[in-house]
């Protein structure tokens, strides 16, 4: 709205300096209103000459009591009356009063701009892949400004379609839009978008899959591989230590087998003593032979 007013004033100033004439700022009126354009202070002389023009075309002319043109009604003081004004009646209105000598004694000029009141707006919600599209309907209306409110705060968006991503949209967020022009302003009720992913962050894809799930899978796989690697290292170390201990025991066994075994040699003094004992026993006299039992043998004579 402020931008449109600034442009209007700028064009007016350009026209003033280029043409050397003054153009009054536009007075905005709604379709169907009753508009009275005042001629000015003071009464209207009875013998005066009054003319009204609309865009330099005469719509009213009266000289004294004689009417030459009376397309539009005029009040008793010379004010122009526009009943049930329509958009086609937009334009520049000029009223002039002359005396009997044809001298201009009074003049007024007004720029009337007629607009339709803005319609009742509605907000349509469409759930899309990456968020929600909110449309302030109806759209594509000339000279109508659009503004948005989110949770009671005014937004900088002035487009008819407001896109809200999942990262910005939270559960319970309320939106409303406002349509306004120079003569009217209407707003919608608060609307809360309801979509399957409302309040959820926007999904990010990795290799065509949800990024967070892919990260979980990759981290889990890496952890499993690390655990398997640690287990393999531990098994290799244990096998290496076992083989090293076994090799050490085998080397010690070979070394012991090559050394002389003094534990199995006979005790020389003990052997000599045993031999002497056996010898002494062999030198003892033999015991007498037992006599045979039975009758004595008869010796021959």
Image (cartoon, helix red, strand yellow):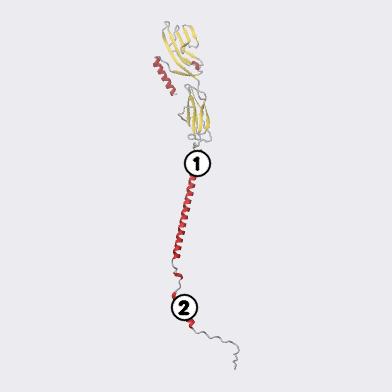
Q: Is residue 232 visible?
A: yes
Residue at (49% x, 9% y) in the render? 69
**Pointer 1: residues within 10 angstroms few (<14), some, or many (20+)?**
some
Q: Quadrant of residue 109?
A: top left
In the picture, the quarter occupied by the C terminus is bottom right
Structural distance between the alpha carbons of marks 2 and 1: 94 Å
Of residues 261 and 213, the one nearer the viewer is 261
In this view, the residue in front, 90 or 36, is 90
Q: Which residue is mark 1?
A: 214
Badge nearest the viewer, 2 or 1: 2
Estimate how packed mark 2 is, as few (under 14), some (14 to 19) or many (20 or more) residues with alpha carbons within 10 Å: few
Could you say where residue 123 lies in the image, as x and y percent from the top left?
A: 52, 28
Question: Which residue extends farthest front?
Answer: 301
Q: Residue at x 40, y 18 (%)?
A: 14
Position in image of residue 208 (x %, y %):
51, 38
Residue 44, picture quadrant: top left
x, y percentage for residue 181? 47, 22
Q: Which mark is residue 11?
A: none
Label 2 close to label 1 by CB (< 8 Å): no
Task: Residue under label 2, please give it.
Answer: 275
How many callouts does the rendering have? 2
Residue at figure coordinates x 42%, y 21% from the top left: 7
| Residue 40 visible | no
Which secondary structure, mark 2? Answer: helix
Q: Provide residue 166's location: percent of width, then percent of height.
A: 49, 35
**Mark 2 or mark 1: which comes first in sequence?**
1
């Amino acid at each position: 709205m402020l931008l449109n007013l600034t442009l209007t004033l700028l064009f007016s100033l350009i026209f003033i300096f280029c043409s050397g004439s003054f153009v009054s700022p536009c007075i905005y009126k709604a379709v169907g209103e009753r508009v009275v354009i005042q001629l000015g202070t003071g009464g209207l002389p009875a013998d005066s000459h009054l003319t009204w023009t609309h865009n330099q075309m005469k719509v009213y002319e009266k000289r004294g009591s004689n009417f030459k043109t009376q397309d539009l009604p005029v009040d008793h003081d010379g004010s122009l009356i526009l009943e049930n004004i329509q958009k086609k009646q937009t334009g520049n209105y000029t009223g002039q009063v002359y005396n009997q000598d044809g001298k201009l004694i009074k003049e007024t000029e007004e720029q009337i701009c007629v607009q339709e009141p803005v319609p009742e707006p509605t907000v349509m919600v469409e759930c899309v892949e990456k968020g929600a599209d909110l449309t302030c309907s109806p759209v594509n209306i000339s000279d109508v400004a659009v503004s948005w409110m989110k949770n009671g705060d005014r937004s900088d968006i002035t487009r008819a379609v407001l896109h809200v991503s999942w990262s910005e949209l939270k559960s319970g967020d309320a939106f409303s839009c406002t349509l306004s022009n120079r003569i009217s302003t209407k707003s919608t009720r608060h609307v809360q978008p309801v979509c399957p992913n409302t309040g959820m962050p926007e999904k990010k894809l990795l290799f065509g899959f949800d990024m967070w799930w892919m990260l979980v899978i990759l981290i889990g796989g890496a952890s499993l591989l690390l655990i398997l690697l640690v287990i393999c290292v531990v098994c290799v170390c244990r096998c290496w230590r076992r083989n090293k201990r076994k090799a050490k025991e085998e080397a010690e066994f070979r070394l012991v087998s090559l050394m002389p075994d003094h534990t199995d040699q006979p005790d020389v003094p003990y052997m000599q003593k045993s031999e002497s004992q056996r010898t002494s026993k062999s030198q003892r006299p033999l015991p007498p032979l037992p006599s045979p039992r039975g009758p004595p043998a008869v010796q021959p004579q």
